[in-house]
Image: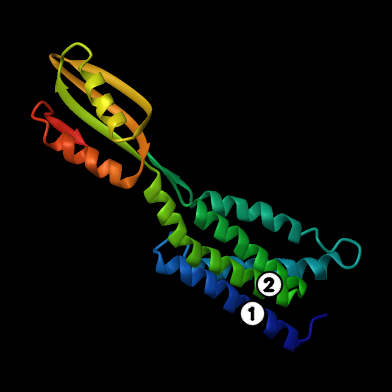
């Protein structure tokens, strides 16, 4: 049986570690923020403690082992798939790791849990700048252009993509009357995208341009 001091240490450390990770998510206005991460961390810790009490020495992990399964459902709920991008994966991973921190505290691995928390926050804070830098180096964008129908007219714009060192990953063309609607999914450097957009905006043949 845990002493009152041990319980206070577990709850206090859980609040601290969950709060640190949750604060980072809250500052970035993510769907799972300060309170949510704390509750997840605390729930994982309590289930781990209860598992030790109920399972005893023969099977102490029978409840705690299902924490990972339960966290998977919560994590899946914060992942959203849009037309161009999938969001929420980092928050889902943060939820998963917050549960791991709670389980670590529940098992009494305080130092390991503290080190894990520091590493999680380091990745979320420090490496976010690197992630933004990498995104600028290789952005995925979708362009939609409407222009008058002429034979192989779309090739003109694809050559402009190539001229600006942008790589076409997917394309679709649709004809409506005498107008062509072209859609391209393109990857490349952020600056190359900007110079391409600047050139297309000056093209009088383009009646509609979404970027």
Residue 173, relative to residue 208: is it above or below?
above
Query: Would residue 211 be visible to someone looking at this image?
Result: no
Instruction: Give the residue furthest to the top.
Output: 151
Instruction: Give the residue furthest to the bottom.
Output: 5
Instruction: Give the residue furthest to the left.
Output: 204
Asked if the residues shown at circle 2 and circle 1 are in contact, with their CB atoms under 8 angstroms apart, the answer is yes
Q: Secondary structure at mark 1?
A: helix
- Which of pointers 2 and 1 indicates the residue nearer the eye? 2
The label on residue 13 is 1
Counting residues from the N terminus, which is met first, the one under dot 2 or under dot 1? 1
- Residue visible at 24% across and 31% down in the picture: 144
Q: Quadrant of the N terminus?
A: bottom right
User: How far apart in space, not on screen, are marks 2 and 1 (Cα)?
Assistant: 9 Å
Number of residues whose C-alpha sits closer than 10 Å to that of mark 1, classed few (under 14), some (14–19) or many (20 or more): many
**Relative side of 145 to 70, left or right:** left
> 162 or 97: nearer the eye?
162
| Residue 180, image quadrant | top left
Q: Secondary structure at mark 2?
A: helix
> 97 or 77: nearer the eye?
97
**Relative side of 58 to 132, left or right:** right
- Residue visible at 33% across and 35% down in the picture: 165
- Give the x, y percent position of residue 164: 29, 35
| Residue 147, image quadrant | top left
- The residue that label 2 is drawn on is 113
**Relative side of 126 to 84, left or right:** right
């Amino acid at each position: 049986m845990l002493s009152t001091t041990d319980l206070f240490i577990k709850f206090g450390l859980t609040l601290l570690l969950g709060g640190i990770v949750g604060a980072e998510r809250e500052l970035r206005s993510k769907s799972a923020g300060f309170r949510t991460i704390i509750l997840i961390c605390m729930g994982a810790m309590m289930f781990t403690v209860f598992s030790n009490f109920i399972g005893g020495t023969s099977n102490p992990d029978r409840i705690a082992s299902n924490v990972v399964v339960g966290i998977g459902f919560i994590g899946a709920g914060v992942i959203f798939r849009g037309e161009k991008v999938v969001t929420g994966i980092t928050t889902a991973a943060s939820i998963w790791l917050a549960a791991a921190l709670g389980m670590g505290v529940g098992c009494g691995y305080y130092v390991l849990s503290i080190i894990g928390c520091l590493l999680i926050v380091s990745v979320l804070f420090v490496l976010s700048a690197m992630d933004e830098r990498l995104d600028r180096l290789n952005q995925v964008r979708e362009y939609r252009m409407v222009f008058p129908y002429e034979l192989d007219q779309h090739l003109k714009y694809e050559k402009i993509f190539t001229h600006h060192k942008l790589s076409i990953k997917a394309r679709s063309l649709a004809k409506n009357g005498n107008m062509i609607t072209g859609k391209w999914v393109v990857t490349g450097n952020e600056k190359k995208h900007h110079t391409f957009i600047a050139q297309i905006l000056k093209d009088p043949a383009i009646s509609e341009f979404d970027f």
